[in-house]
Amino acid sequence: MSAAVLEAGWTRKRARMGVCERTRAKNDTDSPAPIPSIDSIYLPWSQELKSRLLDDFPLPPPLGPVPDDVPLPPKYPIELLPTMKLDIDIDAEHDPEQDASADAPSPTAGDDDERKFQTSKTKNAARSHVDHPKQGNEQAREDLGRLKANFPAHLARQDPVFERLNPRGFDALDKDNILKDHPEKYLLNPPAGQPSNLPPQDLLPIPNTFVSTLTRHERVTPADHWQDVRHLSFEVQAGEAINEIAKWVGNLTLSIWPKNYPEDVEELIGQMGWEDVADKPLQLKGRAPKGLYAHDRVASLRQLLAHNLDITAVPKRSFIRELVFFTEDEREKERLQELTQSGNEQEFYDYTCRPRRTILELLRDFKNVKVPYTRVLDLFPIIRPRDFSVCNGGDCFKKATRDDAITIEILVALVEYKTIIRKPRQGLCSRYLKHLPVGAGLAVRVKMSSGPRLVPNLTWARRPVIAIATGTGIAPIRAIIQERESYDGAGDVVLFFGCRNRAADFHFEKEWRTYRGAVDVYPAFSRDSIEPEERTTVSGAAPADPAADVVPKGAATAVQYDSHKNYVQHLIRKHAQRVGFLMTRRPIVCVCGNAGRMPVSVRSALLDALVISKVVGSVGEAEAWLTDPDKVTYWQETW
């Protein structure tokens, strides 16, 4: 266990015993008092419940309750199958000649790279594949057909720096011996920090999923922008489900199961001492945890850790409590018990949730913890799928290289940040998608929303749309607009789009001008030093303080939190006459983006627009208008 963690634990222990130590910095004295959490309520309740159950339902002698210091039997037992051979490779293409030649001498990668460099150095760069790439559909077909190429193009595909600098150039790298670019354009050696190995691409037997292939992977924000946003495209082999899925364009989500990186899995195996059993077949006995998938209920420990168990999640209290049973170090036991004791909720929060410390990092601190491999399914959480709004429709939805496939696109904002422990944090799925190479196979699920179908027929397509989106919330709006483009005579679309900077995250800016139908975009850039008009920051429907409970009727109050930034709600009030006119034509109102203040502020602005445009005479009448399904279809998707 690390000295810093132990010292912190003993410092708090001595403080509780009356030993005064001046260990806090000056500015710590201003820290707020711990906020009561759900744990501070739940723990006393659970202890009282246990006591009441023992009183009301006493155990017959000589039986007694299992002592707290005795571990319970595994809930999800697994056992070794030493005589069985584990073989769940999904790759149906097996080349015996390649196996036969595996031991034959071959030139080193460096020699091969040098040979290709010399043979291609005089080629005509004017016919560049990097600077003049092929059309997307043509390129996708070639990519899918060359996944097994021997030329080491996969290194470039796995290289995020190369991808960022040449967003469409790396697809041409695996055309062996017909290179048309100067070799300097081909970055084959990954820079420092690039993962040496990517997660395995084995497809798990997940129910109700389709086999898909990544056909496009492009960063759409500048390299120096604070947020990394990716535009991904998948060819999904949906088969007979294509027609049903197509009915719900605009209300679709794509579910992706992320995976752990090999170096993280290897570190955990070494820390726990599982090297001897890591690659042996394990049989899942009895029922398995919900969301765990394995072929024929057989998998190796390494496969479970790579595909199914979230070893980089923030540890829960129950996880830490169970670790007490698996260490012989008394100081570690005491520290683990302190973190889970009733009354130590703030200490638990400060160690786990506040810095977003992962399970893997916790186990680095408690080096003497050795969890038996038979307990992994009981302790480690299951990797859950991440849902992304589908951002394409219409003809773009139907373009694919196979008759039984559809193209599905998503817009993903990668989760990357720092906490008080200063080490960069990455979401599990963000890290997985960030380095996912074109041509990678995934098992994905396409889900239909429980909301209304927004473009079911020509009648709905002819209704006007008032769309409000922020950031990657533009994804489902784009899908709706593209789907409406497939109908003649589609109604007007007014889009209020909010982002930080025009030059950084104005997603699909050039695309909006290419549609046949009328798509009017009013962008709000909150960080481009654009001061909103004062009249647009005044609302008769919103309180000055969003937390206020009472607002005088009919009072027009300034919304202070957004009065000096350019937000979508300001533009709705600014263009109230246009919004009010569309409100009288039975519009479809779509609100997509962050689930914080934005949806509330947007709704208030829409109510104001109804009053300002004199469609109604009061906020109360505006509320009745906006909630009447015969006048407005109001659809909201926020996260």
Image (cartoon, rainbow, N blue to C red):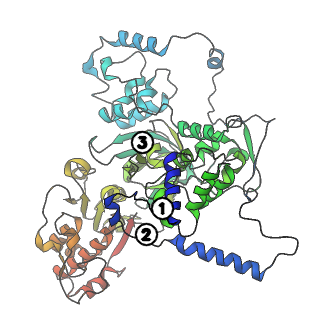
Q: Which of 381/472 is in front?
A: 381
**161 with respect to 506 (left or right):** right
Per the image, the residue denoted by label 1 is 349
Closer to the eye: label 1 or 3: 1
Q: Position of residue 147 (x, y in %)?
A: 50, 29
Q: Position of residue 220 (x, y in %)?
A: 30, 44
Q: Earlier in the sequence, mark 3 or mark 2?
A: 2
In the image shown, does 61 or 626 lie closer to the viewer?
61
Please tell me which residue is depicted at 78% across the width and 69% down the height of the picture: 65
Q: Nearer the viewer, residue 410 or 287?
A: 287
Secondary structure under the numbered disc 1 in the rendered image: helix
Residue 34 is labelled as 2
Which residue does the numbered mark 3 point to in the structure image? 434
- Return the disc, 1 or 2, that comes first in the chain's sequence: 2
Q: Which class describes the residues within 10 Å of circle 1: few (<14), some (14-19), or many (20+)?
A: some
Q: Amino acid at mark 2?
A: Pro
Q: Nearer the viewer, residue 452 or 311?
A: 311
Q: Mark 1 and mark 3 in contact? Answer it, CB < 8 Å.
A: no
Is residue 243 in view? no
Q: Disc 1 vs disc 2: Cβ atoms closer than 8 Å?
A: yes
| Residue 319 to residue 176: above or below | below
| Image quarter hosting the C terminus | bottom left
Task: Pick whichever of labels 1 and 3 is earlier in the sequence.
Answer: 1
Which residue is at 35% across, 40% downward?
A: 218
